[in-house]
DNA sequence: GTCTATAATCAGATAGAC
DNA sequence: GTCTATCTGATTATAGAC
């Protein structure tokens, strides 16, 4: 599959990866052709060679980030308790996801792409949890959709606050959620992400 | 109290209000002196008269938005079930809060101001819920901190997705959370916000 | 594929007139 | 308080050389 790669794919991919990095570490307002070119060591006009407009770049970035994320979740779900995956995985990159959602609110064409991935993520997560609950019959009195949403949004909120240095009440929340939705602690997910 | 208002406070306040509006409807990347001046019908240099730098403006905006939000919560908690308030109130303006949090990640001076309000909001919310649980002794097996976090972050996630037109599973999640954390439905909050 | 050169627009910020 | 004028630098984007 690496042989079918067309020429020019290298710099293109470098630009996309650099864009994700800039969005995550400096915010989407800092995303510019200058900043990206600087990151990959080329002149800024190179961005317009691979992506006519910055919007085209952004769409490519969203697709790249979305596919990568879906693959990570699929892999994690296959080898670990989906509940723990949802609880522990979003921590790293939730800021990037928030940035895409924020951008989507102000551009219809970006919104279309983002919502596509939001729904794909949700479907994947709900199915994994439903499947897991069906196998191990638990005492959780909540539908899979609610479990997914609680684990993911609370986890993201905790991560978001922690990235600002705020952790008031986090330990209490963390252990309460784990007592409510996660069991025993027999399985660990410290092996993949 | 309206009599003690210094001259010049009018345009200043208009600019702050306009800034919140721009951040909410167009995103913080669209916030500029040009855009604000246009909104209040003045020339763009007026922004630098009231706020030396855009950073100063942003700090004033955060304080304005924070104080206003705290007041709204205090008022709502005084006259309605705090659980329902947390569940139903953030919907309108959660995007603005997310924007401030995103900005705070990339500027230490803004971060200091944002975290101050994050903690003030949290304290207010936890205290209101704890007080409410102490009065009406309920069967919820969760500490106030966890109840606050679940209600608020799930509510914000639902609102965030809904603003993009995504509502897959929302009804299921909504009724599950209400069954888990909200009771009877005897009291309604459809009277204030 | 990557470069130089160039265009038009917009950004924040300051000085000074009224 | 609000204005005009001005500066400096960043932005996206295109045309064309190599």
Image: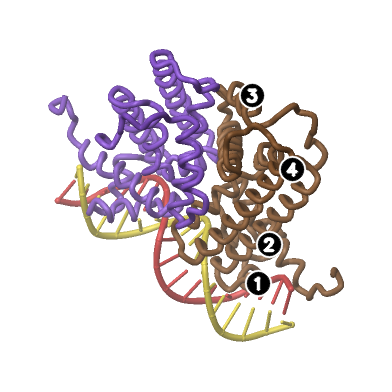
Chain colours: A purple, B brown, C yellow, D red
Q: Report the residue at 82% width, 39% height from top.
A: B191
Q: Position of residue B159 (x, y in %)?
A: 61, 35
As drawn, the label of residue B175 is: 3
Question: Which mark is nearer the camera, 4 or 2?
Answer: 4
Q: Do the residues at pointers 3 and 2 share their chain? A: yes
Q: Is residue A134 above or below residue A100?
A: above
Q: Report the residue at 60% width, 24% height from top.
A: B176
Mark 2, chain letter? B
| Real-space CA distance between mark 1 and mark 4, rounded to the nearest whole angstrom | 47 Å
Tell me which numbered mark, 1 or 3, is placed earlier along the sequence.
1
Q: Do the residues at pointers 1 and 4 share their chain? A: yes
- Is the Cβ of the residue at disc 1 closer than 8 Å to that at disc 2? yes
In the image: residue B180, left or right of residue B2:
left
Q: Position of residue A25 (x, y in %)?
A: 37, 53
Tell me which numbered mark, 4 or 2, is placed earlier along the sequence.
2
Tell me which numbered mark, 3 or 4, is placed earlier along the sequence.
4
């Amino acid at each position: 599959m690496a042989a079918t790669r067309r020429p020019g794919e290298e710099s293109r991919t470098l630009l996309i990866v650099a864009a994700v990095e800039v969005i995550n570490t400096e915010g989407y307002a800092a995303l510019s052709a200058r900043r990206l070119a600087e990151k990959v060591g080329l002149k800024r006009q190179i961005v317009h060679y691979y992506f006519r407009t910055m919007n085209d770049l952004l769409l490519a970035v969203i697709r790249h980030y979305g596919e990568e994320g879906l693959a990570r979740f699929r892999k994690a779900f296959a080898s670990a308790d989906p509940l723990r995956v949802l609880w522990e995985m979003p921590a790293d990159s939730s800021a990037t996801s928030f940035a895409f959602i924020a951008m989507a609110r102000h551009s219809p064409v970006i919104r279309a792409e983002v919502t596509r991935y939001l729904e794909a993520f949700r479907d994947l997560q709900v199915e994994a949890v439903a499947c897991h609950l069906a196998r191990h019959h638990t005492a959780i009195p909540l539908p899979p959709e609610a479990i997914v949403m609680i684990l993911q949004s609370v986890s993201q909120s905790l991560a978001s606050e922690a990235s600002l240095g705020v952790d008031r009440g986090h330990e209490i929340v963390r252990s309460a959620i784990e007592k409510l939705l996660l069991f025993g602690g027999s399985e660990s997910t410290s092996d993949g992400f």
